Amino acid sequence: MAYQLPGWWETAALTLACWRVGALAVPVLPAVRAHGLERILRGTQARVCVVPDEWEGFAHAEVLAELAPRLPWLRRRVVVGGRGADGRGRLRRVLRAHRARARTVRAGAAAA
């Protein structure tokens, strides 16, 4: 899971959630722009990318939406803040889904 967030509480929550479920966390500095973000997402083949809607006047969500068609392995684009739109998930919904999946995996492991 790649995330390009400033020093917000969501950044810490995502890092801890990745560690908890065993996902690879790929933090990206918010100063990285379109070309750099695309290179990082290509190199890591992250399936989820979390960005702020806008930060310091830069439209991160729009840039990610423009990059997405060139990144077929990118399954989810999550936008923190803003209003959300087609193809964008909300952070809380994604975290709930990961928690539910982790509970299912743990329950299956305990039953085995």
Image (cartoon, helix red, strand yellow):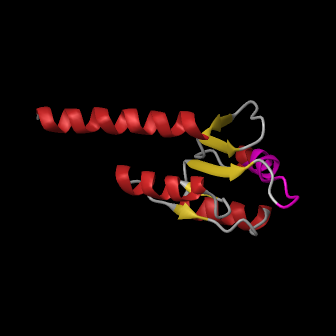
Residue 61 in magenta stretch: yes
Residue lying at 58% horizontally and 52% vertically, measured from the top left: 10
19 lies above or below 28: above
Residue lying at 52% horizontally and 59% vertically, measured from the top left: 12
Instruction: Judge left or right: residue 69 versus residue 22.
Output: right
Give x and y (percent) for residue 45: 55, 56
Give x and y (percent) for residue 8: 63, 58
Residue lying at 61% horizontally and 50% vertically, measured from the top left: 49
Residue lying at 66% horizontally and 49% vertically, measured from the top left: 71
List the single residue furthest toward the right. Answer: 57
38 lies above or below 107: below
2 lies above or below 66: below
Q: Foreground residue, 83 or 72?
A: 83
Q: Foreground residue, 5 or 44?
A: 5
- In this picture, which residue range is highlighted in magenta? 56-67
Q: Foreground residue, 44 or 16?
A: 16
40 lies above or below 83: below
Quadrant of the frame with the C terminus: top left
Residue 65 in magenta stretch: yes
List the single residue furthest toward the front. Answer: 9
Instruction: Judge left or right: residue 102 versus residue 10.
Output: left
Q: Quadrant of residue 35?
A: bottom right
Give x and y (percent) for residue 94: 53, 37
Give x and y (percent) for residue 13: 50, 53
Instruction: Judge left or right: residue 58 versus residue 98.
Output: right
Count the numbered circles shown.
0
Q: Quadrant of residue 65?
A: top right
Per the picture, the main secondary structure of the magenta-coloured stretch is helix
